[in-house]
């Protein structure tokens, strides 16, 4: 651990009043000086959206257990951008933690999740970043079983940092006894979408997005496997989305010989 | 090329009336049967957002040059989900193309871009998918120089398919003569954010997100280099965000010995 007391940015996507972010704040207060920037309304499923077509609000709100808190009209990613630029003013925090999300963000959820996208944005800003999520989407979720693991993972990241361009996606199973921590890869799973079709009072159709999570990945090194077996999953994530392995193949297509 | 006439889903993020999507439709009509599903309002910067907290509209609109077109109140990713589930009803198209975006989506833009996220969603649905973007964000952008390249790239993907879990991010420079196509990796660049701070008529602060693109990546194998040198860039992209190279390092942290 560095000698100075670390500065920790806490963000989420469920909004500033969610029990999950309060649970995360309670642990981070033991590790450093905490600043919270969170959306003023729920932003689940916002992915890496940023607000460019309308202006943003950023308001300091009352202290929560002595912690400086700001709420914004923006997305989870906007929270990180606003924190870095308007609150830290370029002097970056030592750690960015996002969550604890009410609901899992394992496997392909990493790409839809506002919680994880906020952590990705922290990593883009070269801040060691972690997203935390728990397998209970209810407002009344009890995060207490997760907290010792949240603490040790955050401590390790504060001690060691993370490799450039990477962050951690941490998910907790809902169980009486979390068996330990597994370092995993993202399972190759997806949603089978369904749209609930309804008629409005004017007899016009509208749709609600629903979906069923489908995992065809039988690997025992995945986050889905770890959670199914009562382990906390830790997946290192990167924002270089290049499929490096596909470059040699595409070069065999010899585009420029036909142009 | 397969013997049957391919079915091609065309989506975008700039909205159904944007000249960029009409340019893309004009090329795709030469290659197959085209179905368009696009947002009813601009959705730039929406990333991989999905609409879960409010219902979606999906309306068939008048034919454009004989092509079946739908507009939706949803995000670019919602367009793909709605197309697969409500229009194609599970019989997937042979190709999903997104764009042509008014403005580049090279480097880190892949993660903020609605155009690219729609193509990523196509790939998640196992549809060969390509996002196209052009270095002119104006409404009056002239896409004519891009179109021969759009056609040949789409043809190759229809012929060969793409490796599982991958899609293409294609960007075009603004130049009189595009020199050819380069297969690239995503440059390691980012935005330096700034927020334009203003006062509303009630003297309350609000902010507009702005930013300057900063490329510190000197590689000559990147999309930024290709575009700066008047080549069209083609980056294979994957939605497995696992930083596989970081897994051995994290295993040395021996989390479970301390719990």
Image (spheres, coloured by chain):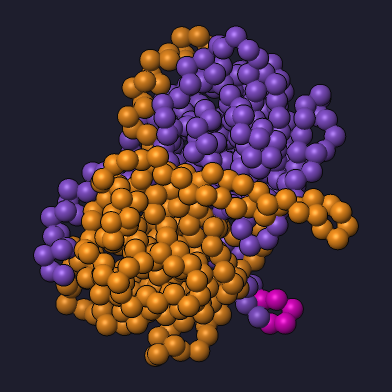
Chain colours: A orange, B purple
The part of the chain drawn in magenta is B199-203
Residue A217 coordinates in the image, percent (x, y): 36, 40
Q: Identify the residue shown where x is 81% and y is 29%.
A: B64
Residue shown at the point (80%, 39%) measured from the top left: B60
Give above or below for A82 relative to B162: below
Residue A24 x/y as whole percent: 37, 76
What type of secondary structure mainly makes up the magenta span? loop
Quarter of the N terminus of chain A within the rendering:
bottom left
Q: Is residue B200 magenta?
A: yes
Measuring 82% from the left and 38% from the top, which residue is drawn there? B61
In the rendered image, the vertical position of residue B232 relative to residue A82, given as above or below: above
Q: Is residue A172 left or right of residue B257?
A: right
Which residue is at a point 51% across and 79% down the rendered structure image? A17
Which image quadrant for residue A67?
A: bottom left
Mark count: 0
Spot occupied by residue B21 in the image (x, y as percentages of width and height): 69, 33
């Amino acid at each position: 651990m560095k000698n100075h007391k670390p500065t920790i940015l806490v963000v989420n996507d469920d909004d500033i009043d969610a029990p999950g972010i309060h649970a995360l704040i309670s642990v981070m207060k033991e590790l450093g000086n905490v600043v919270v920037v969170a959306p003023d309304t729920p932003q689940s499923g916002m992915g890496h959206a940023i607000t460019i077509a309308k202006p943003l609000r950023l308001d300091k709100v009352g202290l929560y257990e002595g912690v400086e808190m700001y709420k914004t009209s923006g997305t989870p990613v906007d929270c990180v951008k606003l924190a870095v630029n308007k609150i830290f003013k370029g002097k970056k925090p030592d750690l960015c933690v996002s969550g604890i999300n009410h609901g899992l963000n394992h496997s392909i959820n990493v790409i839809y999740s506002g919680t994880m996208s906020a952590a990705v944005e922290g990593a883009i800003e070269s801040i060691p970043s972690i997203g935390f999520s728990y397998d209970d989407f209810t407002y009344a979720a009890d995060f207490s079983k997760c907290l010792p693991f949240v603490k040790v993972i955050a401590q390790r990241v504060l001690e060691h940092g993370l490799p450039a361009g990477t962050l951690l996606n941490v998910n907790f199973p809902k169980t009486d006894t979390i068996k330990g921590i597994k370092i995993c890869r993202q399972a190759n799973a997806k949603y089978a979408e369904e749209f609930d079709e309804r008629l409005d009072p004017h007899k016009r159709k509208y749709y609600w997005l629903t979906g069923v999570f489908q995992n065809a990945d039988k690997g025992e090194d995945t986050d889905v496997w770890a959670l199914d077996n009562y382990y906390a999953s830790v997946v290192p994530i990167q924002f270089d989305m290049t499929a490096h392995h596909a470059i040699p193949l595409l070069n065999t297509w010899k585009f420029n010989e036909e142009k």
